[in-house]
Image (cartoon, rainbow, N blue to C red):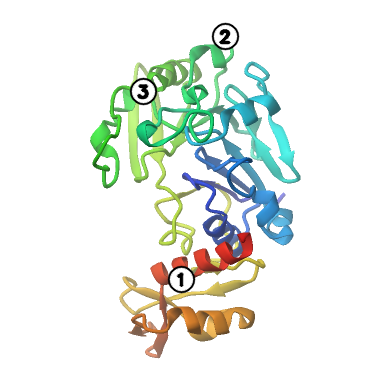
Amino acid sequence: MEEKSILVLGDSHARWDYLCSILAFYSPDLCIVAGDFGWWPKLFPLPHDILPASVLAATELHFLDGNHEDHPSLCAAAPRGSFQSVELAPHVIYHPRGSTMELPDGRTVFFAGGGKSIDRAYREEGRDWFPEEILERAHLPSKLPKVDIVLSHTVPAAFGIAKHSWKNAPRGNFDFSPDPSVKVLDMVLRGCRPSLWISAHYHRRLDGIYAENGMRTEYHILDQLDGYFCSSAYSSAAFWLSGRPCRDSIGFGFPDGSIAEARRDASGLYGCLPHENIPLQYRGAAEEFFRGRTAPVLQGADGKQICGAYFHDVGDFLRALWKRKWT
């Protein structure tokens, strides 16, 4: 039997343009977003309203809740204590706190979403902030199962990820006080005893090993998905649980599901999307968008010149395309 490819991504924050880009290009069999997915039915389009049907037909899209979600909406679909995944739309599946899933290779995953918003002061309760964001012990089964993998949004206190671990820690009225969720995750760690733990939340890639009383847990905290990271299957926002990506190259997916391969220079340090690789239907818009921006001329590994757009500019272009689609 062919191995299924399973990709885990960090916070997507309803950035369906970036999510589509990596899903369209690499086409994993299954993708799981580790919280802050962007389930805001009253504020933004939902993924199944926006993503091309071809992308969702190729990839089952799974997610757990983070702190930035419409929690009452998710609780209505999957009440606390149900521990059953819910297909909110075709190929869009929510895994509530305390639910489990068996992967095609036989490994079992335990889901424990939730976490505290450090930007609470800038949000409005009932609109884009809900007290249900905090993970409580009562949200989980009374007896925690032994599993192979835990997927959470934030991380156990035992991992020692301090507040300074936030990438580019924002200034202003942000709340870095202790998150009660992390103590609950300590109980999950010692009750489930997973060999692998994957989470997100900190908008920074952090990897390590936690060992205690004969338990050894490898952990990976994923960066948020953004324009820099939608070009690489091995970015700091991505972790492949199994299988290889269908493509070994790098590139971008576009709103209609079409793809464009990018190239790196001979050193492997710099890259761009060659203009001739942009799908024909987007070239006119691309020429207009990139006009006036620095267009790199790089020396490719094959000695040929590469002329195109830098990855961060392509990310901005994708955003502009999707904004046009949303409006």
| Outermost residue to the top | 142
Q: Is residue 50 above or below residue 261?
A: above
Give the residue pinned by disc 2.
Answer: 142
Q: Position of residue 105 (x, y in %)?
A: 64, 39
Instruction: Give the class, few, some or many, for how many residues have Cα within 10 Å of label 1's Cα (few <14, many ≥20).
Output: many
Contact between marks 1 and 3 (CB within 8 A): the answer is no
Q: CA distance from mark 2 to mark 3?
A: 21 Å
Q: CA distance from mark 2 to mark 1?
A: 48 Å
Give the residue pinned by disc 1.
Answer: 314
Residue at the spot x=34%, y=72% of the render? 268
Q: Nearer the viewer, residue 214 or 233?
A: 233
Q: Nearer the viewer, residue 35 or 15?
A: 15
Q: Nearer the viewer, residue 44 or 33?
A: 44
Q: Is residue 6 above or below residue 318?
A: above
Three-letter code for the amino acid on which mark 1 is drawn: Val
Three-letter code for the amino acid on which mark 2 is drawn: Ser
Q: Quadrant of the C terminus?
A: bottom right
Residue 288 visible, this orientation: yes
Label 3 element class: loop
